[in-house]
Every structure is written in structure tokens, then in C-alpha cells.
Image (cartoon, rainbow, N blue to C red):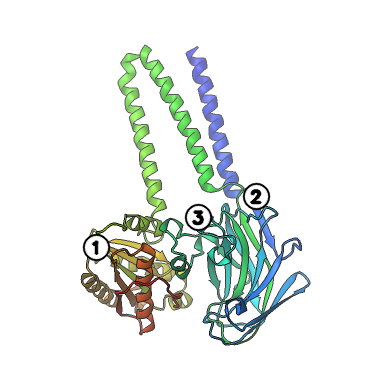
């Protein structure tokens, strides 16, 4: 009976291994879901320009075969960020958007009729009832990325996790830290528009199509499901082992050690998984999610914790990528994060905010001491040895949390100070001592 029982367990284990391997192979190499925009007439398309925001620009849309032609005349006005835009509306009959959380990549066939110095902005607009209002389109989250050199890179492939949420939108909406990252669980529109630094003039933007590809089930869901199955298997094995232990007391210690080793391994894997989720995979420093607990404290009491924030931006980093390639750019980012780590205190928290921007959170630090630390880091970066003998500098924005100030306003002030440092020549340290409720978008 025992041999038959062991044979049955071995068969079940083998079946589970085969199912696991098939599931992993299908997840990584199997077919993907594909959403195609631009060739399906059933999808509603809108053309938008800055006249809705007080601007003067004029946009019009026409169809040329399977392509959309967005004609745009950028006209100067008091509105600071003129644009023309085409929007693919993805709202269904029930008024809900499309869940693209399992999608990982977008291929964009969009270019100007003649090459331009500025880029094409690609956005996925997401609804979340935690911060969105169905009657106010400005409350929808902008997951955005700007595409350059659209003639040379055609089409352009965008990894959705590379998209970013503009800091000005987070500040304007007073978005809590839990919702700082990109979201694609209810996308209500896919937008393609003129870039951030578009100049007055007449332009023609050609949009052939957009393909958004993804998996039928997310990696996290699959891995969690497999983990649950294997955990249940381990639990079943544990129970069976205890039953056998009653009949085989002389083997109890050995089997107990095996169970403890298995438990330790599971805990280690769990800790490693949590570490990966809060760390930037390239530099090894914290990501936005890893830094979020700093701002999850209760700041509404009578006492305000002494906390200073330093926003750091690598000067002209785009030129490094454009001139030497992204491999050298990654080397610079890694060396930059190491330089920060080696010249800060153990209690200071370093996070990669996005792209070439880093944030240094300094607990129990006055703004005077934070400015001194920022100046020290600025000199260290300027004097450091960089790949390809590059000369690398950085700009710094410093702020100290004030009484009754929200984390969003605090971050916005530090970000504004960084903007001032960049506007005043870069490679310098600037501070902010006044609370702000609204900030403008940073420009590199």
C-alpha cells in the first residue's frame, strides 16, 4: 500500500511539473492578445487641439486609405503647451475602458510628414475611481512617453512599463503615493499628439496604426497561481509526513529538518521577490514603490517629522544616449547611483525616480544640512571618473517638509527647485522654502 501510495504521489508530482513547464512555456513563447487601432472603423476617433485649454491651435483629421492624417496648425497664444491630438476612444457600451494590465508592448506607426526636432507624444489614458471623475477628463491618469526620430525609428516599439506619469499631473491632482506609477487596468483612450516642444507652424502627422500586444494572463497572476499550487502540494506533503511520523518516530527528526529547510527556502524566495519589486533593476537602488513608505507616515499631527528631499537630475543625459548609445547611458546611470550611495549616510534613502532623475530622502535633516550634502554630491559627481571619459554633472533641487504639508506638495516643491536649478544653468543646487500647490511640467 505504501509503495502504491508513493507511486501515485510521484505521478501527481510529475503531472504538476509537466503542467507547470507547459504553463511557463505558453506564457513566454505562446500567442499573445493583440489590440489594433487605426484599421477598425468601429473604434471611435476624436481630434483634439489646445482650443479647449484657451489656445489657438487648429487640428483637423482625414482618412487616407488605412492611414489617418492629422493636420495641425500651431498658433501662439497664452497657453504654454500647444498641441494637436488624435484620440482612439476605447469606452464600451457600459461606459468602461479596456483592461490592458496584461499587455506589455505597443508598436506605434506614427511619423511627421517631414522630419522634426521635437517628438510625438504617445499616451494611454486610464480611469481609476480612487482619483478619477467621469465628468472631468483632466482627472484621468496620463501614462505617457515621447517618441523621437520617428522617421528613422519606424515603427517605434514602446514597453508599457517604461511609460511615466507626469509629475505635474500627480501634483495637480494631489495623487497619493500608492497611485504614482503607470496604470492600465481601465484604459479609456489611446492618444497620439505633437510633442512637448512643438514650435508654431503647420505640421502633418501620419498615423498608420497602433498595435498593443499582451498576454492572456499576467506574469504575476500566473506565478502566484503556480506558487499557490506548489504551496498546497508542500502542505499536503507536510500533512502526509506528520501522519507517517506517528508510525516512524525514529525518522521524525530528519523529516522535521527537511520541512524546516523547505520553509526557509520559501521565506527566502518571498523576501527576494519583495526585494525585486521595490528595487530598480538597473541601478539596484530603490524605485518609486520602494520610496513610498517614507511618505506613508502620518503627517497630519502637531509635530512634523524633520525630513529633507533632494531631487537630482543628470544634466544633458539624453545627449549621452544619443551620442554613445543606451549601453553607455546605462553604465553612467549605474556609476551615478554608486557615487550617490558611496557619499551618503546609511539612513539616507536613494531612489531612481524615472529615467535620469533620482531622489534622496534624508530623515532628521535640516534644509541647511541637506544643501550641504547636495553640494558635496554635486562636486563628487563633477570630479568622478565616468565611462568613455565623459564629463557628467547634475542639478539638485532641495526642500524640507513643512508643517501640515502634504507629501505631494512637498515633492512638488523639491521638483520645482530642481527645475529652477536646470533653468539657471544646471550643475548647481537650488532650494525651495515655500509651499506650492501647483507646479509646471519640468523640461530637460
Residue at point 46%, 68% (across, down) = 172
**In the image: residue 58, left or right of residue 286:** right
Which residue is the extreme one toward the front? 302
Q: In this rendering, is residue 16 above or below 380? A: above
x and y percentages locating residue 331 in the rendered image:
39, 68
Q: Which mark, by number, is residue 130?
A: 3
Identify the residue at image location x=26%, y=72%.
374
- Residue 146, placed above or below residue 37: below
- On the picture, is 241 further left or further right than 189? left
Distance CA(mark 1)–CA(mark 2): 52 Å
Task: Name the residue at the right extreme.
Answer: 65
Spatial separation of the CA atoms under disc 3 and disc 2: 33 Å
Give the class, few, some or many, for how many residues have Cα within 10 Å of label 3's Cα (few <14, many ≥20). Answer: few
Return the residue at label 2. 31
As drawn, the label of residue 431 is: none
- Mark 3 vs mark 1, foreground winner is 3
Query: Can you tell which of label 3 and label 2 is closer to the viewer?
Result: 3
Q: Say if 273 sits above or below 90 in the image.
A: above
Q: Position of residue 204 (x, y in %)?
A: 67, 81
User: Which of disc 1 and disc 3 is earlier in sequence?
Assistant: 3
- Specify whether 9 is left or right of 331: right
Secondary structure beneath dot 3 equals loop
| Label 1 Cα crowd, 10 Å radius (few <14 / some 14-19 / many 20+) | some
Q: Which numbered circle lies on residue 306?
A: 1
Residue in the picture at 49% in, 19% down = 6
SS for tag 2? loop
**Who comes first in sequence, dot 3 or dot 2?**
2
Question: SS for tag 1?
Answer: loop
Number of on-image labels: 3
Q: Who comes first in sequence, dot 1 or dot 2? A: 2
Amino acid at each position: 500500500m505504501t509503495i502504491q501510495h508513493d507511486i501515485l504521489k510521484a505521478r501527481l508530482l510529475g503531472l504538476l511539473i509537466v503542467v507547470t513547464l507547459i504553463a511557463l512555456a505558453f506564457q513566454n513563447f505562446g500567442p499573445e492578445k493583440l489590440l489594433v487601432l487605426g484599421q477598425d472603423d468601429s473604434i471611435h476617433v476624436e481630434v483634439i487641439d489646445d482650443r479647449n485649454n484657451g489656445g489657438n491651435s487648429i487640428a483637423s483629421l482625414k482618412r487616407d486609405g488605412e492611414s489617418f492624417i492629422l493636420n495641425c496648425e500651431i498658433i501662439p497664444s497664452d497657453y504654454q503647451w500647444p498641441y494637436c491630438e488624435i484620440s482612439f476612444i476605447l469606452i464600451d457600451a457600459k461606459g468602461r475602458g479596456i483592461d490592458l494590465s496584461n499587455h506589455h508592448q505597443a508598436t506605434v506607426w506614427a511619423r511627421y510628414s517631414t522630419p522634426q526636432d521635437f517628438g510625438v507624444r504617445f499616451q494611454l489614458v486610464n480611469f481609476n475611481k480612487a482619483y478619477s471623475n467621469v465628468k472631468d477628463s483632466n482627472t484621468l491618469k496620463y501614462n505617457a512617453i515621447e517618441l523621437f526620430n520617428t522617421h528613422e525609428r519606424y515603427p517605434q516599439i514602446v514597453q508599457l512599463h517604461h511609460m511615466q506619469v507626469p509629475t505635474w499631473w500627480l501634483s495637480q491632482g494631489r495623487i497619493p503615493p500608492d497611485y504614482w506609477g503607470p496604470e492600465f487596468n481601465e484604459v479609456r483612450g489611446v492618444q497620439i499628439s505633437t510633442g512637448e516642444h512643438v514650435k508654431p507652424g503647420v505640421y502633418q502627422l501620419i498615423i498608420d496604426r497602433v498595435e498593443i500586444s499582451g498576454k492572456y494572463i499576467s506574469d504575476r497572476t500566473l506565478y502566484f497561481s503556480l506558487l499557490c499550487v506548489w504551496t498546497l502540494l508542500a502542505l499536503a506533503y507536510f500533512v502526509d509526513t506528520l501522519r507517517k511520523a506517528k508510525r516512524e518516530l525514529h525518522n521524525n527528526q530528519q523529516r522535521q529538518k527537511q520541512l524546516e529547510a523547505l520553509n526557509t527556502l520559501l521565506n527566502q524566495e518571498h523576501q527576494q521577490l519583495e526585494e525585486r519589486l521595490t528595487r530598480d533593476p538597473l541601478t539596484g537602488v530603490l524605485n518609486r514603490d520602494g520610496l513610498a513608505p517614507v511618505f506613508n507616515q502620518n503627517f497630519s499631527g502637531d509635530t512634523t517629522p524633520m525630513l529633507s528631499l533632494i531631487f537630482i537630475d543628470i544634466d544633458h543625459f539624453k545627449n549621452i544616449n544619443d551620442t554613445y548609445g543606451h549601453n553607455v547611458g546605462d553604465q553612467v546611470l549605474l556609476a551615478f547611483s554608486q557615487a550617490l550611495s558611496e557619499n551618503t549616510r546609511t539612513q539616507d534613502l536613494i531612489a531612481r525616480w524615472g529615467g535620469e532623475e533620482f531622489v534622496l530622502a534624508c530623515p532628521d535633516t535640516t534644509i541647511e544640512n541637506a544643501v550641504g550634502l547636495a553640494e558635496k554630491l554635486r562636486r563628487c559627481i563633477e570630479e568622478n571618473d565616468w565611462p568613455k571619459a565623459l564629463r557628467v554633472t547634475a542639478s539638485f533641487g532641495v526642500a524640507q517638509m513643512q508643517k501640515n504639508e502634504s507629501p505631494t506638495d512637498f515633492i512638488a516643491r523639491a521638483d520645482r527647485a530642481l527645475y529652477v536649478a536646470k533653468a539657471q544653468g544646471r550643475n548647481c543646487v537650488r532650494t525651495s522654502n515655500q509651499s506650492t500647490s501647483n507646479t509646471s511640467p519640468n523640461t530637460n
